[in-house]
Amino acid sequence: MIYYLMQIVLLGLDFIYLFIKLFPTRHKVVFLSRQSNKPSSDITLIEKRLHETDPKIETVVLCRTLDGGLKNKISYIMHMFVQMYHIATSEVAVLDSYCIVISCLHHKKSLKVIQMWHGLGCFKKFGYSVLGKSGGSSLTIARAMHMHEKYDMVLTSSQHTKKAFMEGFNVAEEKMVIAPLPKVDLLRNHEYMRAKANEIKEKHPQMKQRFNIVYAPTFRADETKLKKAIEEMIDYIDFSRYNLILCLHPISKIVIDDPRVIIDKNYFSYEMASVGDAVISDYSATSYEMAIMDKKIYYYVFDQDDYDQERGFYTPLEEFPGPKCRDLKTLFTEIEKPDYDQQAVRDFINRYIDPSITDCCGNIVSLILRKK
């Protein structure tokens, strides 16, 4: 029943879209994201380079999360009509997540759609790989919403991540293109990252006085256990020796109200990690970002068995360099050890983020501007 109701709604949207498509196509690129209500660094970098490369090009950035609550859902529906107009009048649409309008409606044949997934590498499973699991969509919903359809091109970070992305997006190999995200350029730029670290330390002077631990956990649909884990870490940590810098996922609803914990949402997680003497992650793609920055990475996987059952992994956790810890005592024992195999981190990242592409932003801009 739900499937047929959705089809009726989508048919109505497609009918309205017929008239919107009468507007002429312009020399324009539209960026679409549900990851945050502000543009990611990847979108910002590409938009800037596009204007430098082609001053006549128009760009429009549409970022809106689909949060819970009736008011927000109604607001997002109105946002979809804005999306429809800009998609109908653009030559290229670039998205970093699933977009209802892109996948469900019928577009002009001239439109080129590029899926630039927001996560580097291929860690936890997503999309078609988790259909029917508690961490994924149901087959009925996926079919009704035409999940991850209408893509002309899907970007991935290396040959070793291609197969996982083909499975997650359910696309043929000929649509896959090796193109690491633009943020990789920044992460590889040691001078830029040092300047960013100095900027953040000036804003948070306590970072200059103690050992900085950055904790950047992945998002969980049910955040109950994660919130408890964060609270336990706060109780465990010795704040006379350490700073705890918490970088939650942009759509996380967890609220931590403790003045000892540093939370600064004005910076992306990789920017905050620039000050980290040690970085704690779990199943997050930020692990790849930290590895590019040559950080010491530790994995706090208190719920590994549950997460593996709910989502699963493309790349086994054991392949990631750095200690895997299920309890706080083990985690902090590992952090306090003087030795760390940094070469393993470098070998790992060169496998999963193609090192031969030295201008990641320029590479993607070329793909956007390239004619079909």
Image (spheres, grey):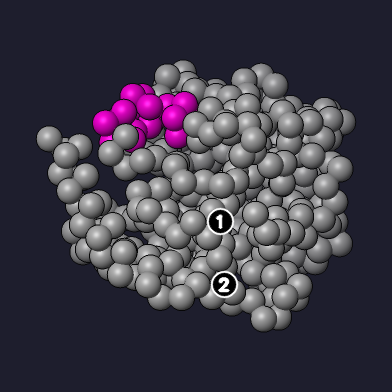
Neighbor class of circle 1 (other Cα within 10 Å; few <14, some 14-19, many 20+) is: many
Q: Quarter of the image containing the N terminus?
A: top left
Neighbor class of circle 2 (other Cα within 10 Å; few <14, some 14-19, many 20+) is: some
User: Residue 216 placed where, x, y %?
Assistant: 57, 45
Quarter residue 195 falls in: bottom right
Residue under circle 1? Answer: 112
Secondary element under disc 2, as helix, strand or loop, is strand
Using residue 190 as the reference point, say whether residue 174 is left or right of it.
left
Is residue 183 something one can see in this rendering?
A: no
In 3D space, how far apart are the residues under numbered discs 1 and 2 (Cα atoms)?
11 Å
Residue range corresponding to the magenta coloring: 124-142
Using residue 302 as the reference point, say whether residue 41 is left or right of it.
right
Residue kind at label 2, given as amino acid type = Lys
User: Residue 109 placed where, x, y %?
Assistant: 49, 56
Q: Quarter of the image containing the C terminus?
A: bottom right
What is the residue that sits farthest to the bottom in this orientation? 56
Residue kind at label 1, given as amino acid type = Lys
Residue under circle 2? Answer: 28
